[in-house]
Image (spheres, coloured by chain):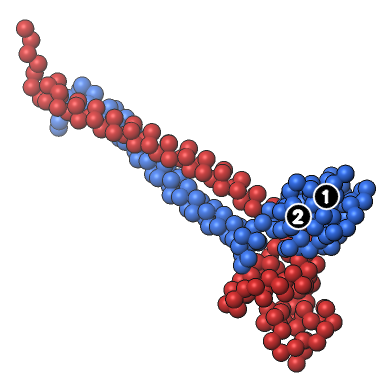
Chain colours: A red, B blue
Amino acid sequence: MSPCAACKLLRRRCAKGCVFAPYFPPDEPQKFANVHKIFGASNVNKMLKDLPVHQRGDAVSSMVYEANARVRDPVYGCVGAISSLQQQVIHLQSQLTVANAKILSMQMHQAKVRSSQTKSLRSPSSSGKLPNFP
Amino acid sequence: MSPCAACKLLRRRCAKGCVFAPYFPPDEPQKFANVHKIFGASNVNKMLKDLPVHQRGDAVSSMVYEANARVRDPVYGCVGAISSLQQQVIHLQSQLTVANAKILSMQMHQAKVRSSQTKSLRSPSSSGKLPNFP
């Protein structure tokens, strides 16, 4: 058996029950390299051991995502993505508010037009009868 | 001079020019404690030293944000916030598409009504002249 990517990088024996092995296969060495560079192997080991087994896969995925983002952008990491998404949410909310206000204004205008048309149809001048002249 | 929060936690002398001191004041011990717990002091030290001084403040802020998020949510960390913001963006984009389609449909309806009103005003039956019978 080939040692997992973590044990290979850390140059240690990949023992049975290794906490990294299920998530860091030997054919994806970069996956562990970035996580190790950003969080440190001993912190990742500790974080995984503190979690129940069924949550470890998700924890590894989110740590790999964070580590890759930090390697790409050492100043903002994935907080840059959060900031950009927050701006996008604010922009979309404002566009939606404008669009909804426009819909409301158009609906009110349509209601006003319909109401004046109904009144005009019911008024004596358009009922087909001649108005009473004095 | 009191040692910075990092040197205090690491039990070392806070030398002049300490890379942590400008960002981890002694009165905010938790700020460094979380960063140390998640990234490890030596990784943070390395990451800061690899950056120009004017970018280190932002790098510390984003690392503190990430570390606090990971302490609160050890499975998803701040990737949970990214996922939730992405969902919010998708939902808002879909609401905006619906609203814009509604506006377009109402504008087309209004244009149709106006066009038929104009035609009806211009047609012989409403021009005041009698139609020509054969």
Instruction: Indicate the secondary structure of the residue bearing disc 1.
Output: loop
Instruction: Indicate the secondary structure of the residue bearing disc 2.
Output: helix
The kind of residue tagged 1 is Cys
Q: Nearer the viewer, residue A74 or A16?
A: A16
- Residue A20 appears anywhere in the view: yes
Quadrant occupied by the N terminus of chain A: bottom right
Output the chain of dot 2.
B
Quadrant occupied by the C terminus of chain A: top left
Q: Position of residue A32 (x, y in %)?
A: 76, 74
Q: Is residue B31 above or below residue A54?
A: above
Q: Position of residue B48 (x, y in %)?
A: 84, 54
The kind of residue tagged 2 is Phe
Report which residue position mark 1 lands on.
B4
Q: Are marks 1 and 2 in contact (CB under 8 Å)?
A: yes
Q: Position of residue B15 (x, y in %)?
A: 92, 51
Relative horizontal placement of residue A66, taking residue B13 as reference (left or right): left
Q: Nearer the viewer, residue A89 or A40?
A: A40
- Residue B79 appears anywhere in the view: no
Q: Is residue A78 above or below residue A35?
A: above
- Name the residue at 83% across, 78% down: A10
